[in-house]
Image (spheres, grey):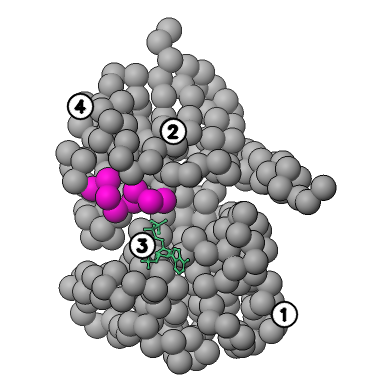
């Protein structure tokens, strides 16, 4: 039997735990001749990698930093959701065509749902304006938040995301780089890569920012589980959420789209947790 592959495209990929959770799911569903593999792809190799995806033994792919937006022009079609979000984290193969989809928005909302958090009517601050931020913003706008404040290092990217959101959700109140509003938000989200291992002492929040006690603070980063952003928020009494559940649910939805099989959530959660524990052990100072 010819082996089939699912690829993870991103750069760098040293610490991704997606292979652990996807391969555990494939085994649990007895899908034997398929493997999920990391394919570290620097930007200059993206076109070459897209050719690999077009090969017969490729079933699909995940896309992560820094390609979630730059992959778009390489694909044959986009689902409506991916087009509206403007970012792709999952590629499906249909009749040889590469279809860009997005399961981050679902994963993000599901991570709130399992904690019984309903963001409807909330004022939300999102740090970042890349693919992950776009998916979170879109999901929150769909869920009926009142206002989204986009805070991003590069102003132009924040403006571009606000413009896209404004077209799709004309009722939504939007602000860009209004850092003073951060303290008034009910939900504060880090959708930047700042604070990710190995740079665990960095935070995207302003220096000496005092997180409001009433806020829910969500970091999409999953390694480390307690980022500096979350540690500071917790110290101020805020409720904190790490990125692991979102990773699991975006992966579960992608698995279902690739295989047509129901995602074994518990298996995926156990595999992700174990892989993360292993990583933390190997990262720990000796
Ligand atoms: P993803 O698709 O996973 O969101 P991305 O598109 O590369 O990845 O976006 C990364 C986000 O992290 C961006 O908002 C980026 O800010 P810029 O738009 O200014 O590049 C943000 N980011 C990354 N490193 C940062 C840093 N050191 N300080 C502040 N923001 C940073």
For the residues labelled 1 and 2, the Cα–Cα distance comes to 38 Å
Badge 2 or badge 3: first in the primary sequence:
2
Label 3, residues with CA under 10 Å away: few <14, some 14-19, many ≥20: many
Say which residue appears at 48% left-offset and 30% top-offset. Answer: 37
- Does ligand 1 reach within 8 Å of label 3's beta carbon? yes
For residue 130, which numbered disc appears in the image?
A: 3
Disc 1 secondary structure class: helix
Look at the numbered disc 3 and give the secondary structure of its residue.
Answer: loop
Residue 123, by quadrant, is bottom left
> Along the polypeptide, which appears first: circle 4 or circle 1?
4
Q: Which residue lies furthest to the right in this view?
A: 286
Image location (x, y in percent) of residue 160? 24, 70
Disc nearest the viewer among 4 and 2: 2
Quadrant hosting ligand 1 = bottom left
Q: Earlier in the sequence, mark 1 or mark 2?
A: 2
Q: Which of 98 and 130 is in front in this view?
A: 130
68 to the left or right of 34 = left
Q: Which label number is shown at residue 74? A: none
Q: Magenta segment: does it hold 125?
A: no
**Residue at mark 1: C-beta within 8 A of ligand 1:** no
Depicted 158 relative to depicted 260: above or below = below
Where's residue 252, x and y in %? 48, 43
For label 2, the residue is: 39
- The secondary structure that dominates the magenta segment is loop
Query: Is residue 151 at all visible to an observer of this figure?
Result: yes
Q: Is residue 241 above or below residue 244?
A: below
Eyeballing the image, is 138 above or below 269?
A: below
Q: How far apart are the two marked residues, 2 and 3, measured between alpha carbons?
A: 21 Å
Q: What is the magenta range?
A: 65-72
Residue of label 1: 235
The Cα–Cα distance between marks 4 and 1, rounded to whole angstroms, is 52 Å
**Mark carried by residue 95:** 4
């Amino acid at each position: 039997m010819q082996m089939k592959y699912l690829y993870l495209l991103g750069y760098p990929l040293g610490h991704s735990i997606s292979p652990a959770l996807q391969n555990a799911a494939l085994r649990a569903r007895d899908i034997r001749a398929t493997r999920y593999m990391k394919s570290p792809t620097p930007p200059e190799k993206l076109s070459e990698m897209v050719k690999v995806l077009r090969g017969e033994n490729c079933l699909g792919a995940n896309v992560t930093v820094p390609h979630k937006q730059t992959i778009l022009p390489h694909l044959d079609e986009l689902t409506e959701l991916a087009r509206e979000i403007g970012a792709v984290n999952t590629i499906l193969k249909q009749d040889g065509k590469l279809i860009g989809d997005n399961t981050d928005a679902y994963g993000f909302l599901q991570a709130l749902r399992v904690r019984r958090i309903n963001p409807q009517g909330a004022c939300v601050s999102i740090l970042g304006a890349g693919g992950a931020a776009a998916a979170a913003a879109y999901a929150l706008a769909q869920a009926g938040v009142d206002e989204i404040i986009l805070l991003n290092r590069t102003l132009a990217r924040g403006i571009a995301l606000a413009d896209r959101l404004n077209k799709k959700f004309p009722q939504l109140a939007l602000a860009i780089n209004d850092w003073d509003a951060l303290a008034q938000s009910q939900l504060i989200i880090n959708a930047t890569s700042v604070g990710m291992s190995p740079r665990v002492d960095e935070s995207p929040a302003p220096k000496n920012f005092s997180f409001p006690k009433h806020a829910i603070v969500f970091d999409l980063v999953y390694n480390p589980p307690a980022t500096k952003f979350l540690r500071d928020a917790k110290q101020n009494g805020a409720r904190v959420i790490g990125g692991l559940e979102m990773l699991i649910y975006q992966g579960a939805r992608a698995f279902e789209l690739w295989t047509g099989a129901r995602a074994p959530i518990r298996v995926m959660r156990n595999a992700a947790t174990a892989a993360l524990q292993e990583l933390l052990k190997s990262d720990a100072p000796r």
